[in-house]
Image (cartoon, rainbow, N blue to C red):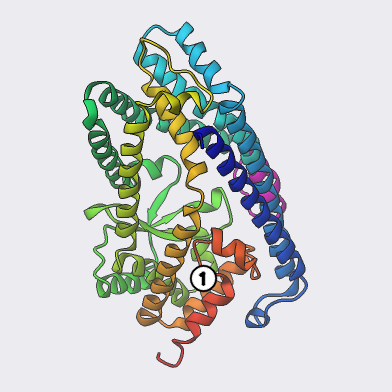
Amino acid sequence: MTLLILFVLFLITDFSVRNYLAMRQIRHVRLHQDKVPAEFSHHISLRSHQRAAKYTIARTQLSLFESIVDTLFLVALLLLGGLQWLDLFWARTVDSEWLRQLCLIGSVFFIGGLIQLPFTLYRTFHLEQHFGFNRITPTLFIADQFKGLLLALILGVPLISAILWLMASAGTLWPWWAWMIWVSFSLFVMWLFPSVIAPLFNKFQPLDREDLQSRIEQLAQRCGFQLNGLFVMDGSKRSSHGNAYFTGLGKNKRIVFFDTLLNKLNEDEIEAVLAHELGHFKFHHIRKRMAISFALALVLFLSLGWLSQQVWFYTQLGVLPQLGRPNDGLALVLFFLVVPVFTFWAGPLMSLLSRKDEYQADAFAAQQSKPQHLVQALIKLYNDNAATLTPDPVYSAYYSSHPAAIQRVHYLKQFYEKN
């Protein structure tokens, strides 16, 4: 069976599965929108439950249409000759081999970004606006897009240039060198994010609530988490959704609260939410996910190293490599366009691992604070963020990184008597 036939079969399967799951989710949520689950009936009104159902359905419908457009874009690039045309265009236009390959890679990402832009605009200024979540202004939106593009150029061009140079100069060992550069780059960005990258988009101020700060510092000390500061982020200037997270590496670790979260939860609930986040730290979930990510990256680089030398890899996916000129940029683009199609089945496995980690972090939070407080916080966040309480089980198993609301509350309630 040729690579082209395999690609088409996987593409059809991936497309069919995604659409089937989206339709299941829409049907299931709509079917259960007129009754609040008993576990939440004393805290969430029927009106709020129906609002969450409509919000979930609208988001799923948008993602359904988005997946159709993404598939058509991929078909246009590979099966209809779009990538071949771009490669020949830059070959005729640019003499420098390095710049030609960068232009090819950049143009594919740029066109993909342009195709995604209408969905981002619709999601932000219609869907989120309609349900009362959006607070970003058009001016701030444009500024965010410009900063994101500039940051991608500043960080991405040197990284891609280094990989292209290795592909051309390092012989058969280039995948190993490229992988080491990728790992170093990823760790550097994670270290840089709290103090340099994130402040480009948001303002961060030290937490100025002394009682809450004292409780959090005691919690962090019990959990063995060395703080480099407690910060409040002005998330409310973009959205009313609330969250909290810790970020950074080594001594550059921070705990960050969205200002919207602090306005929605009391101190007991904030401590419980943070205890959950520290549970991820305590059980090394972030490190484990990084290790899995880096291991998968090595497999991908080694696979690319072999495939880039096979003529059929190009020809059977709709492009002809140029004779007498390097095709490393073409190989990079082609590989990372088709990899998601062939590996879509891995998504549910990663979701399963993530849900397992969430249960473990919940159990840790129940030991470090009161489980009732975490349940109360979750119910408030489900309600305020219009998260559906009745997702389709199959859809949730495939996509969800967190357990469904009912499952999560049931799990936490087993700790009530222990505390």
Left or right: 13 with respect to 50? left
- Residue 384 placement: quadrant: bottom right
Q: Please name whichever residue, 4 or 179, is drawn nearer the observer in this view of the structure.
A: 4
Q: Is mark 1 on a helix, strand or loop?
A: loop
Magenta-span inclusion, residue 129? yes
Residue 389 pos. (x, y %):
64, 70
Residue at image position (42%, 64%) is: 353
Query: Residue pushed farthest bottom?
Result: 417
The magenta region covers 121-137
- Residue 306 placement: quadrant: top left
Residue 369 pos. (x, y %):
39, 80
Residue at image position (72%, 59%) is: 26
Left or right: 304 with respect to 56? left
Residue 330 pos. (x, y %):
43, 23
Q: Can residue 331 be seen in this view?
A: yes
Q: Is residue 376 visible?
A: no
- Residue 335 placement: quadrant: top left
Residue at image position (61%, 64%) is: 394
Magenta-span inclusion, residue 413? no
Residue at image position (29%, 25%) is: 167
In this rendering, the answer to whether 281 lies above or below 412 is above
Q: Could you classify mark 1 by the number of other residues whose Cα lies within 10 Å: few (under 14), some (14-19), or many (20 or more)?
A: some
In this rendering, the answer to whether 314 lies above or below 336 is above
Residue 334 pos. (x, y %):
46, 29
Look at mark 1 in the image and give the residue it sits on.
Answer: 265
| Tally of marks | 1
Query: Residue pushed farthest front?
Result: 1
Q: Please name whichever residue, 65 or 263, is drawn nearer the observer in this view of the structure.
A: 65
In this rendering, the answer to whether 361 lies above or below 21 is below
Mark 1 belongs to which amino acid?
Leu
